[in-house]
Image (cartoon, coloured by chain):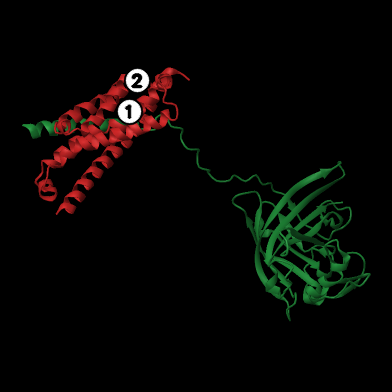
Amino acid sequence: MKQLKNKLQLLFVVLISGFGYIVSCTHDNSFPPPQAPSGFVPTRGTNIHTPGSMTAGNINEWKLDKVHSSALWSTSYVAASGLLTGRFNQFGMHDVTTPKMLNYVTNGQPLLDSSWAFYEADPTKTYFNGYVQINTSNTGEPGRDAGCNVAGMGTTPIVAGTQNLTVTNLAKIQTTKVEYDLLSNDYIVTLNLTWQGKLAAPLTTSIVGKLKYVPKANVNGTYDVFGLQLKFQFNCRDYGITSTSIADKIDIECNMNFHNK
Amino acid sequence: MDQSFLEYLDLLELLLFFSGYPLIYLIVKSITETAWSKKVFKTNISNFLPLAYAITGVLYVGLQVKNLYPDFSSEHIQSAVQLPYLKLWALLSILFFIPALSKKIVISFLHSLVFFFFILKDLYFYLTGTLLLESVKNDMNIYSLSLLINFCAFVFMLITFLGVKKLRV
């Protein structure tokens, strides 16, 4: 009888406690967690930009506005925490094949900037080629740019009035695949970077970068402009660069602006 | 600060230390009645319940002393202590260190039922719609901690007893 009484008491207390826990375990008054993102919804247009023959005055043919474009690089300066930055004064958007790797006696663009096409709504059709002249790297320090940088990058000094597109002075990129970025309106670009650096022969590595399209806009009702911004990284040690003043990783940012004047 | 809020906080302290004891008491009593318990412990382990309860009381007193420190003047005690009768009732738990009282195991159970009643009361008021769910949630959190405290106090007493017994052998 005493045992039964104990068990009944235990049952009563357990039931009360259990009821309390069940009641307090509800989430009636709790704020639900924020809804999980249902996926990025892109807002891309259908613009198509191609260079054609780059005929002046043809509004359907887009021209590289080199004066307002840039090819920038940056890397960590090993001896300090800050960045070492610079730009290439001479660059272009042409597929510089081996026969075209020459010295061009001109102060302007040596080759037509026409090796590209951009399809906003169909990245499979988008492609571009680009190049920079290594010896035109400009860090704002002439002593460095025309001095140790030349030997350090395995190239030759600038010759006035000449555009040096020879193999030792040329770094070029060529896209192999362009696809949508699923998390933004940008594009994911796979490209080949070819550069000799301090190696015995040019080396091509495949790199993934990000391309941003700055949509077409009209300027004062007279002409249109649009922009492409490409960002990628590469390891300069792959190309035999041994300088201990800079880090392995080099960031490249190409800001290309186009107009249809 | 609202006086009723201070009273509520003091009541939570009391529930924290004593409201879990009835369940621990009944579970231990049930275990004691099994043959397994008699074989393993070779003693009636429910005899330690009042002492474990008294230890919980000491811990509660310690908390009250800490709350009052460093001003133990009567004025400060009067202004700081809410629910004085209930607290006095809680302090009586220390009396279970007295062997004559600790032999009456069921008294410790009855003593702690006063605090368990507040849990019961809140559940009732919740069911009748006069208490918010948050209060019940709070009660059950406190109740869980109280179960833990009382269980630890009992285990402490049991280990102490078994240790002393082994040393004597």
**Which comes before the other along the chain, label 2 or label 1?**
1
Query: In screen coordinates, is A146 left or right of B85?
Result: right
Does any portion of residue B127 appear in the rendered image?
A: no
What letter labels the chain drawn in green?
Answer: A
Q: Residue furthest right?
A: A161
Element under disc 2: loop
- Of the 4 image quadrants, the one containing the N terminus of chain A is top left
The answer to whether B162 appears left or right of B35 in the picture is: right
Is B39 placed above or below B56 here? below
Chain under disc 1: B
Color used for chain B?
Answer: red
Horizontally, residue A136 falls left or right of residue B15, namely: right
Across and down, in percent, residue A72 comes to 78, 59
Location of mark 1 (residue): B14
Q: Residues within 10 Å of mark 1 (few under 14, many from 20)?
A: many
Classify mark 1: helix, strand or loop.
Answer: helix
| Host chain of mark 2 | B
Question: Does residue B39 lie above or below A112 as drawn?
Answer: above
Q: Nearer the viewer, residue B78 or A3?
A: B78
Q: Amino acid at mark 1?
A: Leu
- Expressed as whole percent of the image width and height from the top left, the position of residue B100 reads 15, 31
B65 w.r.t. A78: above or below: above
Q: Nearer the viewer, residue A236 or B98?
A: B98
Q: Is disc 2 in contact with disc 1, using a CB cutoff of under 8 Å?
A: yes
Image coordinates of residue A202 in percent, x first then y, are 73, 77
Q: CA distance from mark 2 to mark 1?
A: 10 Å
* Residue occupying image coordinates x 38% and y 30%: B65
A250 left or right of B39?
right
Task: Using the image, tell me which numbered label, if any, was put on residue B79.
Answer: none
Depth check, front residue: A219 or A62? A219
Q: Which residue is mark 2?
A: B83
